[in-house]
Image: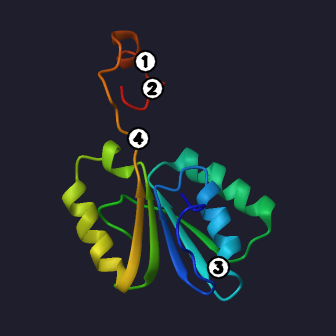
Amino acid sequence: MSVFAEIPSGATILDLGCGAGLDALIAAGRVGLEGKVIAVDFSTPMLNRARQAAAESGLSNLELREADAEQLPIADEEIDVAMVNGIFNLNPSRGAIFQELARVVRRGGRVFAAELILSRPLPAEARASESNWFA
Protein backbone atom coordinates (compact mmCIF):
# COMPACT_ATOMS: atom_id res chain seq x y z
CA MET A 1 0.00 0.00 0.00
CA SER A 2 2.67 2.53 1.02
CA VAL A 3 4.48 1.89 -2.25
CA PHE A 4 1.50 3.26 -4.22
CA ALA A 5 0.22 5.97 -1.85
CA GLU A 6 1.33 9.55 -2.39
CA ILE A 7 3.18 10.30 0.84
CA PRO A 8 4.63 13.81 0.99
CA SER A 9 7.55 14.73 3.20
CA GLY A 10 6.39 16.29 6.48
CA ALA A 11 2.89 14.78 6.33
CA THR A 12 0.94 13.07 9.10
CA ILE A 13 -0.02 9.59 7.95
CA LEU A 14 -2.56 7.12 9.31
CA ASP A 15 -1.95 3.42 8.68
CA LEU A 16 -5.33 1.94 9.63
CA GLY A 17 -5.15 -1.81 10.10
CA CYS A 18 -1.37 -1.66 10.31
CA GLY A 19 -0.90 -5.32 11.21
CA ALA A 20 2.80 -6.04 11.68
CA GLY A 21 3.67 -2.50 10.55
CA LEU A 22 5.40 -2.88 7.18
CA ASP A 23 3.48 -0.06 5.46
CA ALA A 24 3.86 2.15 8.55
CA LEU A 25 7.63 1.66 8.52
CA ILE A 26 7.89 2.51 4.84
CA ALA A 27 5.68 5.58 5.30
CA ALA A 28 7.69 6.74 8.34
CA GLY A 29 10.81 6.69 6.21
CA ARG A 30 9.09 8.63 3.43
CA VAL A 31 7.64 11.46 5.58
CA GLY A 32 11.03 12.33 7.05
CA LEU A 33 11.75 13.75 10.48
CA GLU A 34 9.16 16.54 10.11
CA GLY A 35 6.36 14.04 9.47
CA LYS A 36 4.86 11.26 11.52
CA VAL A 37 2.93 8.03 11.10
CA ILE A 38 0.15 6.91 13.40
CA ALA A 39 -0.38 3.18 12.98
CA VAL A 40 -3.60 1.69 14.39
CA ASP A 41 -4.66 -1.93 14.78
CA PHE A 42 -7.15 -3.74 17.03
CA SER A 43 -4.95 -6.81 17.50
CA THR A 44 -2.50 -6.84 20.39
CA PRO A 45 -0.36 -9.63 18.88
CA MET A 46 -0.03 -7.77 15.58
CA LEU A 47 0.81 -4.50 17.35
CA ASN A 48 3.48 -6.32 19.35
CA ARG A 49 5.04 -7.43 16.08
CA ALA A 50 4.81 -3.86 14.77
CA ARG A 51 6.39 -2.50 17.97
CA GLN A 52 9.29 -4.91 17.62
CA ALA A 53 9.81 -3.92 13.96
CA ALA A 54 9.61 -0.22 14.87
CA ALA A 55 12.18 -0.65 17.65
CA GLU A 56 14.53 -2.49 15.30
CA SER A 57 14.14 0.22 12.64
CA GLY A 58 15.18 3.06 14.94
CA LEU A 59 12.51 5.36 13.48
CA SER A 60 11.29 7.96 15.98
CA ASN A 61 8.34 9.30 13.96
CA LEU A 62 6.08 6.24 14.26
CA GLU A 63 3.34 5.94 16.89
CA LEU A 64 1.49 2.64 17.37
CA ARG A 65 -1.99 2.73 18.90
CA GLU A 66 -4.40 -0.08 19.74
CA ALA A 67 -7.99 0.79 18.83
CA ASP A 68 -11.01 -0.22 16.81
CA ALA A 69 -11.29 1.35 13.35
CA GLU A 70 -14.69 2.82 14.21
CA GLN A 71 -13.30 4.74 17.23
CA LEU A 72 -9.91 6.14 16.33
CA PRO A 73 -7.76 7.78 19.03
CA ILE A 74 -6.90 10.64 16.66
CA ALA A 75 -7.86 14.32 16.69
CA ASP A 76 -10.25 15.80 14.14
CA GLU A 77 -8.50 16.66 10.85
CA GLU A 78 -5.09 15.49 12.12
CA ILE A 79 -4.30 13.24 9.14
CA ASP A 80 -2.97 14.27 5.71
CA VAL A 81 -2.96 10.78 4.16
CA ALA A 82 -4.75 7.65 5.37
CA MET A 83 -3.77 4.18 4.20
CA VAL A 84 -6.43 1.53 4.82
CA ASN A 85 -5.52 -2.06 4.11
CA GLY A 86 -7.94 -4.94 4.56
CA ILE A 87 -10.31 -3.27 7.02
CA PHE A 88 -13.53 -3.17 5.04
CA ASN A 89 -13.66 -6.90 4.30
CA LEU A 90 -12.95 -7.77 7.94
CA ASN A 91 -15.17 -5.31 9.79
CA PRO A 92 -18.94 -5.10 9.19
CA SER A 93 -19.07 -1.55 10.66
CA ARG A 94 -18.03 0.01 7.35
CA GLY A 95 -20.23 3.08 7.73
CA ALA A 96 -18.66 3.93 11.09
CA ILE A 97 -15.18 3.45 9.65
CA PHE A 98 -15.92 5.83 6.77
CA GLN A 99 -17.28 8.37 9.28
CA GLU A 100 -14.09 8.12 11.34
CA LEU A 101 -11.93 8.56 8.26
CA ALA A 102 -13.96 11.63 7.29
CA ARG A 103 -13.45 13.01 10.81
CA VAL A 104 -9.67 12.48 11.08
CA VAL A 105 -8.53 13.26 7.51
CA ARG A 106 -7.95 16.97 6.84
CA ARG A 107 -9.94 18.75 4.18
CA GLY A 108 -8.00 18.13 0.98
CA GLY A 109 -6.34 15.03 2.46
CA ARG A 110 -6.27 11.65 0.77
CA VAL A 111 -7.37 8.11 1.58
CA PHE A 112 -5.77 5.12 -0.13
CA ALA A 113 -7.49 1.76 0.36
CA ALA A 114 -6.64 -1.79 -0.67
CA GLU A 115 -8.81 -4.86 -0.19
CA LEU A 116 -8.65 -8.54 -0.99
CA ILE A 117 -11.84 -9.46 -2.82
CA LEU A 118 -12.93 -12.99 -3.51
CA SER A 119 -13.77 -13.70 -7.13
CA ARG A 120 -15.49 -17.00 -6.31
CA PRO A 121 -16.62 -18.85 -3.18
CA LEU A 122 -13.95 -20.50 -1.07
CA PRO A 123 -13.85 -24.30 -0.93
CA ALA A 124 -15.36 -25.85 2.22
CA GLU A 125 -11.96 -26.83 3.63
CA ALA A 126 -10.72 -23.22 3.38
CA ARG A 127 -13.87 -21.88 5.07
CA ALA A 128 -13.39 -24.37 7.92
CA SER A 129 -9.79 -23.28 8.60
CA GLU A 130 -9.21 -20.79 11.39
CA SER A 131 -6.01 -19.73 9.65
CA ASN A 132 -7.94 -18.42 6.62
CA TRP A 133 -8.70 -14.67 6.73
CA PHE A 134 -12.08 -15.19 5.08
CA ALA A 135 -13.22 -18.09 7.27
CB of mark 2 within 8 Å of CB of mark 4?
A: no
**Pointer 4 residue:** 116
Mark 2 neighbour density, 10 Å: few (under 14) some (14–19) many (20 or more): few
CB of mark 1 within 8 Å of CB of mark 3?
A: no
Toward the top, the furthest residue is 125
Q: Amino acid at mark 2?
A: Asn
Judging from the image, what secondary structure is the residue with disc 4 in? loop
Instruction: Give above or below for 119 relative to 56.
Output: above
Judging from the image, what secondary structure is the residue with disc 2 in? loop
Task: Please identify, in this view, whether the residue under mark 2 or under mark 4 is nearer the observer.
Answer: 4
CB of mark 3 within 8 Å of CB of mark 2?
A: no
Q: Earlier in the sequence, mark 1 or mark 3?
A: 3
Quadrant of the image containing the C terminus:
top left
Query: At 22% from the left edge and 62% from the top edge, which residue is drawn?
Result: 96
Query: At 80% from the left edge and 59% from the top edge, which residue is drawn?
Result: 56
**Pointer 3 residue:** 31
Is residue 86 shown to the viewer in this render?
yes
